[in-house]
Image (cartoon, grey):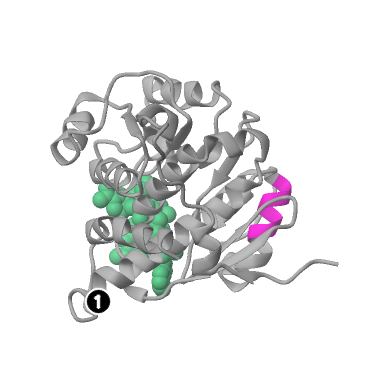
Amino acid sequence: MTTAWQEWTADDAANWIAAPTADDDKYTRGVLGVVTGSSDYPGAAVLGVEAAHRAGVGMVRYIGRRTLRQAVLARRPEAVTVAGRVQAWLLGSGIDQGRRSSVLLGDLEHAFTERVPVVLDAGALDLVGTRTAPTVITPHARELAKLLTSRELPTSVDEVRADPGGWAERAAKELGVAVLLKGAVTHVCDPDGDRYTVTAPTHWLATAGSGDVLGGILGALAATHHRELATNATALTALAATASWVQGEAALRASATVGGGPVTALDIATAVPAVIGALLER
Ligand SMILES: NC(=O)C1=CN([C@@H]2O[C@H](COP(=O)(O)OP(=O)(O)OC[C@H]3O[C@@H](n4cnc5c(N)ncnc54)[C@H](O)[C@@H]3O)[C@@H](O)[C@H]2O)[C@@H](O)CC1
Ligand SMILES: Nc1ncnc2c1ncn2[C@@H]1O[C@H](COP(=O)(O)OP(=O)(O)O)[C@@H](O)[C@H]1O
């Protein structure tokens, strides 16, 4: 018997926030490696790195071409652009699958060799299943339809939108990874049958770059839970639901500061620390 989808709550999310202790330094807290952005979408790199910092990661290593590194550093001088060890990867936001250079493809594939948890977004979704690292994919309906169709599970964006939970589950089973299918209601599930919904608390969340911010939050949560993920890969599902919850709550808070008005993706990222703080106080 399959269980019903469970709506992820603030109390659930509060269980998946790691605060630093006296014994920690930036490395023990967790380093997130990031390969995102392109000359077409440099902003996606900036937004993901910004959101990861705001979500409380120990450090971000951003890997990308010089112009992208400059854009990231202009917003976040805290980011490190030297290759090195990481505890989780965020790959693909702002990358066009059809326009990846061999250097970029090499960077993406190298990320998988470390066997640390991986968040696959946008232009890295097609890499799913090529390695055994704990993986969560973060497509929207169009991206999931395209991915499943390429894996001989033909479907359309309309079919996915008509039954998002069903298609998210099918994807998790077929691909063997955790799936976070974005929407007004985000569906998060895994091959083991964990199934969570996260209902967006404001529709202002549907703004350009909002998904890139989500990727950064999720990457940060994966990096800061690296020890747990080493023995319990299904924690990635709870972390994905938590990231989506934090993203929605941040949009709600950002909107509240402007009287319920619109928010930008950067506003959402900026509101993340207060959401994390409130969760830690619960
Ligand atoms: N500031 C940035 O750098 C941003 C980068 N982004 C990146 O952009 C890439 C592409 O994401 P998408 O979700 O757009 O990609 P998709 O390729 O899934 O969506 C493009 C689709 O939207 C349709 N479309 C385009 N303009 C439209 C319009 N005005 N009305 C109706 N339909 C329209 C197109 O025909 C196409 O079918 C991703 O890599 C993503 O990470 C986005 O997150 C937006 C912000
Ligand atoms: N109608 C909606 N109401 C609330 N949130 C939405 C709605 N539609 C989409 N979202 C959310 O907005 C974000 C959009 O992400 P995405 O599609 O990746 O856009 P982008 O590529 O511009 O970042 C996702 O987190 C999704 O859950």
Q: Which of the 4 image quarters holds residue 67?
A: top left
Q: Position of residue 249 (x, y in %)?
A: 38, 68
Q: Position of residue 164 (x, y in %)?
A: 60, 67
Horizontal side, residue 187 vs residue 39: left or right: right
Horizontal side, residue 207 vs residue 222: left or right: left
Give the residue furthest to the left. 74
- Quarter of the image for the N terminus: give it: bottom right
**What residue is shown at x 16% (from left), y 41% (from top)?**
75
In the rendered image, which residue does mark 1 sit on? 256
Q: Position of residue 108 (x, y in %)?
A: 45, 27
Q: Quick check: is 184 in the magenta stretch?
A: no
Q: What's the residue type where badge 1 is placed? A: Ala
260 above or below 188? below
Q: Secondary structure at mark 1?
A: helix
- Name the dominant secondary structure of the magenta segment: helix
**What residue is shown at x 24% (from left), y 76% (from top)?**
256
The boundaries of the magenta stretch are: 168-174
Q: Position of residue 228 (x, y in %)?
A: 60, 39
**What residue is shown at x 30% (from left), y 43% (from top)?**
53
Give the residue furthest to the right. 1
Q: Residues within 10 Å of mark 1 (few under 14, many from 20)?
A: few
Quadrant location of ligand 2?
Answer: bottom left
For residue 218, say whether it is visible: yes
Horizontal side, residue 132 vs residue 110: left or right: right
172 above or below 207? above
**What residue is shown at x 28% (from left), y 55% (from top)?**
269
Horizontal side, residue 105 vs residue 171: left or right: left
For residue 30, say whether it is visible: no
Could you say which is closer to the camera, residue 23 or residue 98?
23
Give the residue furthest to the front. 22
